[in-house]
Amino acid sequence: MRLRDPAGFDQFAALPLEDEVPGAPAEQLSADQYLSDFWPYFQKLEGAFWKLECRQSFSEPKNPSWRALARGDWAEALRIIDETADEIQAPVLQAPGFPMHRVRIVRRPYTPYLRWELYFIRLRAQAGERIRVLDATALGNRLLPELVILGSAVMYEVRYDDTGTLSGARKIRDPGLITSCRHEVEDLYSHAEDLLTFLDNDQAALPPPSPTADRELR
């Protein structure tokens, strides 16, 4: 895959991420089945963990901080994140010896959800998750799937309904397709910006300042 400067990607045909993943043979999993299926692979992973995250808004009704965000209560949403920092960082700190990578596609103007999420995942970055941010304009018209790749063993195309709520996943086991997609995500990662540096450089990507507290963001 040929990439130019991050300000603009070449346009290609027949790229695995957008052309092969949607039609690839896969096991259809519900949301609960996906979460149950994921953890055994994660705990026994050999290799690296990769996540490609593209949507600009999600719905997370089980998350108390997100519910506060949905009510428009930024102060409460951020307070909950701050008070649960150890819980948020635990999956990274407890990962059994493999690197965790995430490519987060961002689009301006930033959605409230994205600003909330960047505040949330910066804690993951501080704990050691290798998170980088790529501006959506660099992708041109490419429509990329939401992917979770666990080494060479399994890849999930994660699916969401119209509200952005997790609806399930397509479990893909084709080793050749997994390898091709991982290489593409690695290329995107190589052209993206470190999350913490990005947040330093673009304060508009962060939530509005709290009227009652001066939070330390790094």
Image (cartoon, helix red, strand yellow):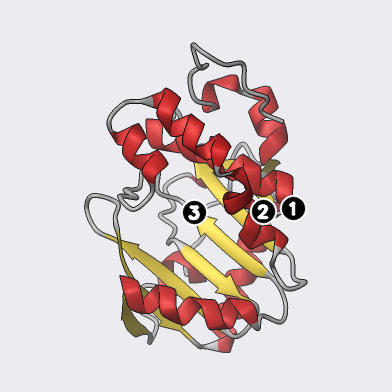
Query: Where on the picture, by quarter, is residue 160?
Result: bottom left
Say which residue label 2 marks.
Answer: 189
Residue on which the image places disc 1: 128
Q: Viewed as shown, does residue 163 lie left or right of 140? A: left
Q: Residues within 10 Å of mark 2 (few under 14, many from 20)?
A: many
- Amino acid type at image mark 3: Glu
Q: Which type of secondary structure does the marked residue at label 2 adopt? A: helix
* Upstream in sequence: badge 3 or badge 2: 3
Residue 75 occupies quadrant: top left
| Distance from Cα at disc 3 to Cα at disc 2 | 12 Å
Q: Residue at x 57, y 35 (%)?
A: 82
Residue displayed at 52% across by 16% down? 209
Q: Position of residue 67 (x, y in %)?
A: 32, 40
Residue 43 placement (x, y as % from top left): 63, 79
| Residue highlighted by disc 3 | 53
Q: Are marks 3 and 2 in contact (CB under 8 Å)?
A: no
Which residue is found at the position 57% from the left and 72% from the top?
A: 149
> Number of labelled discs?
3
Q: Is residue 187 above or below residue 108?
A: below
Identify whether 118 is placed above or below 96. Answer: above
Q: Quadrant of residue 108?
A: top left
Q: Quadrant of the C terminus?
A: top right
Amino acid type at circle 2 is Tyr
Q: Which mark is residue 150?
A: none
Under circle 1, the secondary element is loop
| 3D distance between C-alphas at marks 3 and 1 | 18 Å
Q: Position of residue 213 (x, y in %)?
A: 57, 16
Question: Are the residues tagged 3 and 1 within 8 Å (C-beta)?
Answer: no
Q: What SS does tag 3 mark? A: strand
Q: Quadrant of the N terminus?
A: bottom right
Q: Is residue 4 visible?
A: no
